[in-house]
Image: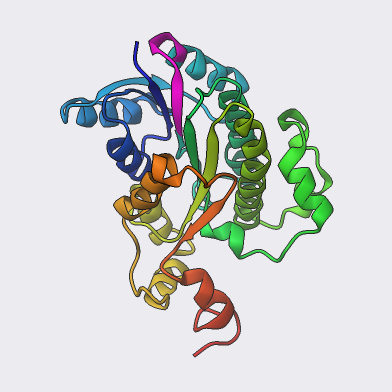
Amino acid sequence: MKDVMILTGAGQIGMAIARRMGYGMKIVIGDKRVENAQAVSKIMNEAGFDTAAMEMDLSSRASIQNLIAKAKEYGDISMLVNAAGVSPSQAPIEAILKVDLYGTAVLLEKVGKVIKRGGAGVTISSQSGHRMPALSAEADAQLATTPPEELLGLEILKPENIRDTLHAYQMAKRCNEKRVMAEAVKWGERGARINSISPGIVVTPLAIDEFNGPRGDFYKNMFAKCPAGRPGTADEIANVAELLMSSRGAFITGADFLVDGGATASYFYGPLKPGGGR
């Protein structure tokens, strides 16, 4: 029996984190497209890791529970890397809320009930959650603590209150950050930690979809005018995840880390500011 890492979302960021943290562990890789999970599994197995691929739909409670049950067959679950999700150009409003918001809430709750003492998790959020104006304290509390099955019934998440897919994505990512705070309290009762990372523009196949989508010019302008002057790489996100998931991050839980090359700073106080800037 080995300690087990659950990796949801067989993409570049998830794989980079798993390669950094998953040596010596059994890594169970779940993705809605099982061929994606199998491709990442093959790359990692051929690099000396011990992985298993399976189909997993983050929008389905049953599918999440099935993934966790499979992972437990290999040993104690000691790490979670949630890098699954869909972007504003990839899916309609309903799917974004079901996957990125509801599914993440279920996953954090379910893994939090079985995570091993000393375990750690990261969920990949987004800089988008930092762009939206602040919500009320009541709305934040609702996003943080409402039982997952009731989340999509909240007034602020009803279809008439969601403007477009980008707004849905921002709400999902804001919910992720608040959810991590609330779940950190519960994970702490088991001696485990959970944090989120909010990447900016990172070059991945998902990001390339965005570059070629209806908001492509917006994204290219964003990384051109952020202080870093470029998009990021998956390994730079993994650098932060390594700190958060290792013993060096033992005092860090319930936090969100914005890793965006300064794009959010520029959005509020620089050339990316809507209607202003240089």
Relative to the observer, which residue lies in front, 29 or 249? 249
Left or right: 228 as drawn, with respect to 111 = left
Does 77 appear in magenta?
yes
Q: Can residue 177 be seen by looking at this rendering?
A: yes
Rendering coords of residue 275 (x, y %) = 60, 84
Q: Residue at x 62, y 39 (%)?
A: 184
Give the left or right position of residue 10, taking residue 97 as reference: left
Residue at 29% over, 22% down: 51
Give the side of residue 103 with respect to residue 201, left or right: right
Measured along the vertical axis of the image, is residue 192 above or below residue 68? below
**Along the line of sight, which residue is nearer the eye, 24 or 54?**
24
Q: Is 93 placed above or below 227 here? A: above
Residue 165: give x, y in percent of width and height.
61, 53
- The answer to whether 51 is drawn above or below residue 155 in the figure is above
Magenta region: which residues? Answer: 72-80
- Closer to the camera in the image, 245 or 230: 245
Give percent across and percent down for residue 216: 43, 65
**Residue at x 47% of width, y 70% of height:** 263
Residue 177 lies within the magenta run: no
Quadrant location of the N terminus in the rendered image:
top left
